[in-house]
Image (tube, rainbow, N blue to C red):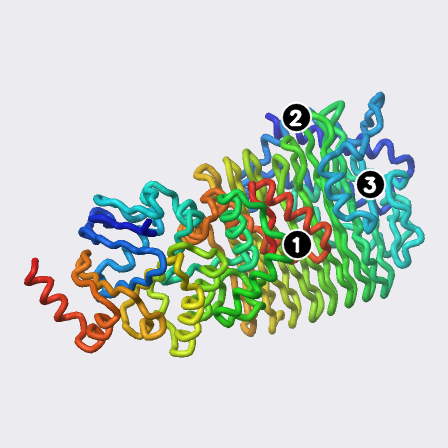
Amino acid sequence: MSMERFREFVDASFFDLERRLNGAGSGPWHQLRRAGHQAFLTQGVPTTRHEEWKYTNVLPLLGLTYQTASAGSSGVAPLNLAAIHSLDTYRSAMGSDEVFLCLIDGQYLPSLSTEHHQIQGLSVEPLTDQLVANDNDVRTALASAAASEGHPFVALNTALASHGVVIRIARGATIERPIHVAMITDARSSDRLQTPRVLVLAEESAAATIVESYHTVGSNGSLIIPVTEIVAHRQANVRRVTIHDDVDHARLIGYTGARVHGDAQVSSHVFCLGGGFVRNDLAIALLEPNAQGFLDGVSVLAGEEYADNHTVVDHTVPHCHSEELYKGVYDGRSVGVFNGKIYVRPQAQKTTAYQSNHSLLISERAQVNAKPQLEIWADDVKCSHGATTGQLDEEAVFYLQARGIGKAEARALMTYAFAAEVVERLPHEGLRTAIEHRIARKLHAEPFTV
Amino acid sequence: MSLLKINGLKAGVEGKEILKGIDLTVNPGEVHAIMGPNGSGKSTLASVLAGREDFEVSGGSVEFLGQDLLEMSPEDRSRAGLFLAFQYPIEIPGVSTANFLKTAVNEHRKARGEEPLEPAAFLALMRERMKLVEMDPSFLQRSLNEGFSGGEKKRNEIFQMAMLEPKLAVLDETDSGLDIDALRIVANGVNAQRSADNGIVVITHYQRLLNYIVPDHVHVLWNGRIVRSGGKDLALELEAKGYDWIKAEAQVEA
């Protein structure tokens, strides 16, 4: 029933959007939207019978009476960004370094964002039908790293996205300041669904760090379905930090696709620290020799929180390297899912690909489903994976107690240390410290760093 | 007042009685060695004193500085001044030796109603005490015991002892797995901490360590009981004659 209603809602939203396009309906972005709409109708809403959605039932998320951002929020006071606690925390952590890009209900709002024009090598533009029509690079890149055919929610985002932001790093430029894309959902007046689209184009030898965070305002339901595409040209270096630390009733189904060219690297750090429901897909395609992908993730969940991380690393050519470390700490009745695929194509000889996934269950009622999935068709490769799920080592807890550290504190310290291993790999000190403190607070531990 | 007073201690694991009535008194300034063959109950005694949960006490009493030790949690025993050097120190990834010790020392200070040490003072203290066991300061930033060699782990135990300044230290087979140089370093570290106020119980299988840490009293544990006590010469006698004659005597007496 709700599935049917949701499909009707998507249809209505799509046709409503199409009517309002005013001439752009024949443009290249809208062609992608049409294909996305069709792909969504063909695939439908995935059920748990679908292998990729086996552990994650999205049906309960679709039962609300959503409005899309385009429906507007007339009569509602402007948002006070400083009052959004999690946003404020991470903005403060980046301090004056931050290049803030504010997206409210998917729409990039330059007036609320950092004035970036004087930053050499950085270009930020709203994603519009006109830009897609006139800019070759944008047109080529859009939907190149996130295919509607392979994923019903990429299809849904593609069908309904009418806003977004394009971040371009010019050839040879290194942007030291973290570029913070904050996606804010205004759910003050109604249940809100939004489909923001972000495109990151790193030209040859360009380097930048993109931080994405998600924030819901208001007590109504929110479902955010963001798609971010990253294209890293030769020798580019893109670091992508994703922070999920939203309110309890926030839901997110996100997809990030990255295309990595020769001698380039993409590093991803995913932090699931709060929010009711998070499903994250991350797909990194290594397209030319010496492309590298680094995938880090840590989930620290409590209460009824849910986080599902699906990753794909696709080694398509020889001499590429990938390294993946995902960890999770699950308290209360929280649930975690990890599914890590590594493809090594027949021609991708001399691949090195490593994956580890470790989970700590600190409550008897918490749950984790972990599935490493390596598909290797080449024979001259070095690939490994390791996955563990367990409880704290009681012998180690006793060791700490025997040195005068109370049992609860010893457990918290060890749990914190378990998660901190992943956080330490984040270079930005301010952000790293804020995340460490957030995790420590959630685990009732002191923040310790090695 | 004695530091430690054990009376008729009986304890075991999973219903099996291992300690069958231990009596031992340690006074300030004394070093006691507890020797015995494998399986005699030496490590069980250390575990029961430190408060390891797997062991059940079925009889007797243990007083530590006049308090009922068996009623105290492992952390309270440590804060009260009892230290166990582990036979197999645990590796704890992600917790640096420095931060672990800072937490431990400050917990001890809190228990005494003292303020936490300033970071600079604490670092200086750590660097000074590391010298006792010739440990390199680079160990401070490494995860606790992770990837340490056997000898490094044991030196780290004695370094921790020096940081916590216990009233009574129980060294559980601290000599096992040590080569002769490491043995000397560890023993020097322990000897530097001997004083008229504190006591040390050295649990060991071999006499070798006792050449360096010379005990005031030597006890032989066999089959869950102390079957013989004497001065440091007893250790030499055991080294020369082995444990069999003690076993034979004990069986005759029983």
Residue drawn 41% across the image and 68% down it:
B191
Let me know if residue A80 appears in the view.
yes
Looking at the image, do the residues carrying marks 2 and 1 touch, with CB atoms under 8 Å apart? no
Query: Looking at the picture, do discs 2 and 3 lie on one chain?
Result: yes
Per the image, label 1 sits on a secondary structure element best described as strand
Amino acid type, mark 3: Cys
Residue at image location 24% in from the left, 48% down from the top: B14
The numbered disc on residue A64 is: 2
Q: Secondary structure at mark 2?
A: loop
For label 3, the SS is strand
How many tags in the picture? Answer: 3
Three-letter amino acid code at the position of disc 1: Ala
Give the answer, above or below, for where B48 lies relative to A224.
Answer: below
Q: Earlier in the sequence, mark 3 or mark 1?
A: 3
Q: Which mark is residue A283?
A: 1
Chain where mark 2 sits: A
- Marked residue nearer the N-terminal end (2 or 1): 2
Left or right relative to A391: residue A71: right
As drawn, the residue found furthest toward the right would be A118
- The amino acid on which the numbered mark 2 sits, given as a three-letter code, is Leu
Closer-to-camera residue (A18/A100): A100
Q: Chain of mark 1?
A: A
Which residue is identified by label 3? A102
Q: Nearer the viewer, residue A46 or A101?
A: A101
The chain identifier of the residue carrying mark 3 reads A
Kindly report the distance in space between the C-alpha atoms of the residues bearing marks 2 and 1.
Answer: 29 Å
Residue A310 appears anywhere in the view: no
Q: Position of residue A274 (x, y in %)?
A: 63, 39
The quadrant the N terminus of chain A occupies is top right
Q: Quadrant of the C terminus of chain A?
A: bottom right
- Residue A189: x %, y % from top left: 76, 23
